[in-house]
Amino acid sequence: MTVPTRIMTRKSRSARSWPANIWLSAADKPAIQSDLFLSFHDGLYLDLWHSAPFRGYNHNFGTEQDFGVGWSGPLSALGLKSQPSDTTLDIGVTYFDEPSLSVLGAQDIIYSHVKLSKAFKWTTINGCYENYVAMPRSPYRGGSLFSAGASNSASFFKDLTSASVSLSLVYDTGGFGLDSGLLFRGSVELDWKLSKRLTMVMPQVNYYVPVTVHDSRPSFDKVVFGGLGYQF
């Protein structure tokens, strides 16, 4: 049994983009992924994501496509105020269509999330709730994740290059047949601005370190990928 691909590699985006990523996991399971993300001025966003393994249909992590809708923006847009800086809300729901594409309602997963972020001088802190509901005949079991973390980013060479890092402590209620417990989840990323609209991500590393869980997860797991993003 494998964890759905999007759970390992999900990456939030705040601009309209069409990136294509080629990533390689620690277990040597390469895949090519594409993401069409549309955001609107009122905070609404739509997301169409696809992943296909190099070795053919449904090898490795499997072929998958996801359909997402959500809203992201400051709480002030909802009539709420916060000091010293505005708190950002990101809320959405995504349908994981896998492992058999276009067979909706069977073996699939509904993912939902609520995330609050607040920027300070040196860092941004966040809290997030994530929930997975397994559809009928799914090989997975639903569950929830509760996390608290921080992130930071910096720009170099007149904003032509940027680096970002994040780290969260996550409590996993035991979804996908895994044990409940705590784990660290984080990322390290370098972005290279190739033109006004074209950006290269090379590399991004998502990593996972179990703290109190003792199941089939390795003591340290990572997903490494890079690709291109185009804003239009």
Image: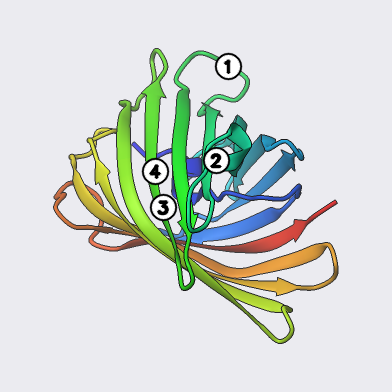
Which amino acid type is shown beneath numbered disc 1?
A: Val
Left or right, residue 170 beside residue 50 = left
Left or right, residue 212 beside residue 45 = left
Mark 4 or 2, which is nearer the eye? 2
Q: Which mark is residue 126?
A: 3
Residue 231 location in percent, x, y?
Answer: 80, 54
- Per the model, the C-alpha gap separating discs 3 and 1 is 35 Å
Mark nearer the N terminus (2 vs 1): 2
Mark 4 or 1, which is nearer the eye? 4
The residue where tag 2 is placed is 75
Q: Which mark is residue 42?
A: none
- Per the model, the C-alpha gap separating discs 4 and 1 is 30 Å
- Per the model, the C-alpha gap separating discs 2 and 1 is 37 Å
Mark nearer the N terminus (4 vs 2): 2
Which amino acid type is shown beneath numbered disc 3?
A: Asn
The residue where tag 1 is placed is 103
The residue at 39%/43% (across/down) is 128
Q: Is residue 8 above or below residue 68?
A: below
The colour scheme used to paint the residues is rainbow
Label 4 element class: strand
The residue at 50%/50% (across/down) is 9
Mark nearer the N terminus (3 vs 2): 2
Question: Marks 1 and 2: in contact by CB < 8 Å?
Answer: no
Question: Marks 3 and 4: in contact by CB < 8 Å?
Answer: yes
- Per the model, the C-alpha gap separating discs 4 and 2 is 15 Å
Residue 144 location in percent, x, y?
Answer: 31, 33
Mark 3 or 1, which is nearer the eye? 3
Does residue 97 show up? no
The residue where tag 4 is placed is 128
